[in-house]
Every structure is written in C-alpha cells, then in structure tokens.
Amino acid sequence: MTGNSYLNCSDESIRRHVREEHRQLNVELDKLFACCLGDQHGCDSQTDWKKIRERVHRLRENMAHHFREEEEGSCLDEAVARRTTLAPEAREIEREHPELLAELDGLISWLDDEPPLETTLQIARTRLNAFAANLKRHEVREDALIRRGVGGFGEDD
Ligand SMILES: [Fe+2]
Ligand SMILES: [Fe+2]
C-alpha cells in the first residue's frame, strides 16, 4: 500500500465501494462460466470459445485493477487506519493477489493452447469453479477484515 488515504470517505461509502467491486467481479465470473456451458445449452463451442477468451481476458484486467486499487491504498488501508492491529492480516490478504492472478494466468494460457472442444469446456468449467472458490474465499476474508475495521458490511449484517 502506498498510503492514498480514503479517510475523507464515510465508512458506508468504503463498504459500498468494495461490495460493488466484488459484485462486479462475481457477475463477470458468472458470465464466463455461462459461456463455458457450451453444448449443454445449445451453444456453438467455436463461437463461444472466442467469447470465453474475451471474457477471461477482461476478468483478468478488471481483477488486476481491483487488486492494484486495494494495494495502493483504499479500503484495506482504511480498515488498518482505524484498527492498526489488522495490519498483518491486511498484508497477508494482499499477498493472495499475485497468487490469484497467477492462477488465472495459468487458465488463460491453457485456454489459448487448447482446441475448442466440449471436453475442453468441461475442464475449463472445473478450473473456473476452483478459481471462483479461491477468489470467493479471498473476498470473504477481505470483507471480514473491512467489517472489523470500519464497521458493518452489508445491509443484513
Ligand atoms: Fe483483494
Ligand atoms: Fe477485493
């Protein structure tokens, strides 16, 4: 983190920002997964393959942007600024960013090399599911840290 403080933002705007960013990433993941349903949904895997590649690249760009924002000082910094004992955990969470990006990069280069077949789509779904679970775990951890630092997170907490 480089200390671009968002201390002028209200707690609610911080929470809303993270919630919205995570929601958008999850929507992108869902759309990508839907593309990978392929022939099961009467889709043409040749056509879908192009969409899958476009979507996975877009997801990669948006994730990198979101992670950079978190690392350069936004919501995690705010949580730490309000409760300094959260600092080690915030650093730990940030260290998951390159791991998640590397996992997605592995999927991207694998997709680039594979032929557009139904079996490839099946494997892509399995890999995407595993990736989505890892990303979700990361977001849950992050949300919990922000909740502890800046108060409630989400209307139903
Ligand atoms: Fe993160
Ligand atoms: Fe995040």
Image: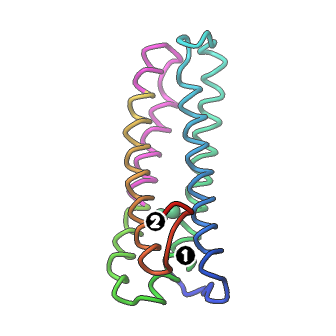
SS of the residue at dot 2?
helix
Amino acid type of disc 1?
Answer: Cys
Q: Position of residue 104 (x, y in %)?
A: 46, 45
Residue nearest the observer in this picture, 75 or 154: 154
Magenta-tinted stretch:
98-123
Determine whether, in the image, residue 147 is placed left or right of residue 95: right
Check disc 1: other Cα within 10 Å, few if <14, some if 14-19, many if 20+: many
Q: Report, in whole angstroms, how far the alpha carbon at label 1 lies from the one at label 2.
A: 10 Å
Q: Is residue 123 above or below residue 140?
A: above
Q: Is mark 1 within 8 Å of ligand 2?
A: yes
Q: Position of residue 79 (x, y in %)?
A: 47, 81
Give me the disc on residue 75.
Answer: 1
Q: Main secondary structure of the magenta part?
A: helix
Closer to viewer: mark 1 or mark 2? 2
Instruction: Of the two numbered discs 1 and 2 on the same chain, state the one appearing first in sequence.
Output: 1
Q: Is residue 108 above or below residue 11?
A: above
Residue on which the image places disc 2: 143
Residue nearest the observer in this picture, 27 or 43: 27
Q: Is residue 64 above or below residue 44?
A: below
